[in-house]
Amino acid sequence: MTTTPSPDLDQPVRLHPLTYLEEGEEVTVGRADIDSYGLFPPDGAELLRRLEAGTPPNEAARWYTEQYGEQVDMAEFLEVLEELELVVKDGEQVAAPTGPVRWQRLGAAVFSPVAWVLYGALVIAALVAMVRRPELAPHYQNLFFTRSSLVLLTLGIVLGQVPWILLHEAAHALAGRRLGLNSTLSISRRFYYVVFVTALDGLVAVPRRKRYLPMLAGMIVDVLVISGLTLGAAAVPDSGGAAGVVHRLLLSMAFAVVLRLVWQFYFFLRTDLYYLAITVLGCNDLQTTARQMLRNRVMRLLRRPDRLVDESTWGTRDRQIARWYQWLLPAGYLFLTVTLLTAAIPTGIRLTEVAVHKLGSDLSPANVADVLTFLTLNFWEPVFAAYLALRAWRRRTQAPATTAKETAHAAG
């Protein structure tokens, strides 16, 4: 059995360089170099400042009692700091102050006043083109820009969106880099949708008014992409041959971007507008609070008090908003489930029937490759989403077992 030596509370504690952001009744404190942050009450942040200034924990605890008239468990307080990786461990080097991040200048240029003027001109030009030529306006029929090849149709709808999706995420990243924040790109899912996710954890240490642009940057780029594709289609005649295919392909991609833009309004998912809403409302983790609130309601109905989640961890503002937001979660998932059963699955069946019929009429290698590619491009997303869901479920179920084994090993 191994034990971790208790820190000497009469000796100063070494801390990494910390950042502080005071907002209302909470102070965000953390390390910008690894994007590790925690929320502290104002008195807790002042206590942390004392420790950072070199005051030994016991002396800081006495100061806290004199200042606020309450006792503080310094051992527990230091455990929280260690969990957040704010304490310098034995043999560890103190983190160096963070400097400029890569692409910070590019981010500043992309969102400069001159750039905003150009973006406005692009959108206005596209709107004028749509008014003059209504056929350029987004319409669902634009998706079906050709009947000549199943693969060509799928390439336009699926692969034709990948560059714009990456551009959407790059806009989030550049808007964050403009503020000196690091970012990471990963693949995740929202119910049965596969999504790219840009993580900007450092936003929690930025004043709220500066968080809006990084959150909205992706949607702003979507609007610019729609405008650019529309103007590109306007410049190419809708005639026969390659020019006509290019014209319709551009409009097809533009409408697909419109669909992704509409998807951002699914507030019950963690979309860009969800993060914008919780920032405006002053929440920290609204969705987790709402999920746990719903869980507690169900457990109370089932008379399972042992399965209740500790409500003391909920923020005051999260608790207030979650009282109505919690009902949006099941309603939203019910809507997506109904859509899956009544639209997505029947459409998938119909597409499969078309592909099989096409395969039955022509077994040439080129046609077989055409049909298989079509099926792969159409069904990779739900299959991959199911894989991500299964992997997340395995991690959740294996984590308690791993913890139990570690505890038993330590006890032995």
Image: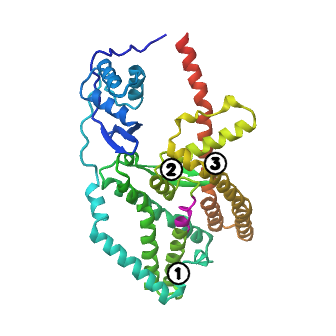
Q: Which quadrant holds residue 14? A: top left
Residue 285 visible in the shown view:
no
Is the residue marked by circle 2 packed among few (<14), some (14-19), or many (20+) residues within 10 Å?
Answer: few
Q: Nearer the viewer, residue 29 or 375?
A: 29
Q: Which residue is mark 1?
A: 137
Q: Which residues are magenta?
A: 259-266
Q: CA distance from mark 3 to mark 1?
A: 35 Å
Instruction: Identify which amino acid the numbered label 3 is placed on.
Output: Ala
Instruction: Identify which amino acid the numbered label 1 is placed on.
Output: Ala
Tag in front: 3 or 1: 1
Is the residue marked by circle 1 packed among few (<14), some (14-19), or many (20+) residues within 10 Å?
Answer: some
> SS class of the residue under badge 1?
loop
Residue 234: give x, y in percent of width and height: 45, 84
Question: Looking at the image, is 45 positioned above or below residue 162?
Answer: above
Q: Which residue is mark 2?
A: 187
Q: CA distance from mark 2 to mark 3?
A: 13 Å
The structure residue drawn at horizontal position 65% and vertical position 56%, both measured from the top left corner, is: 332
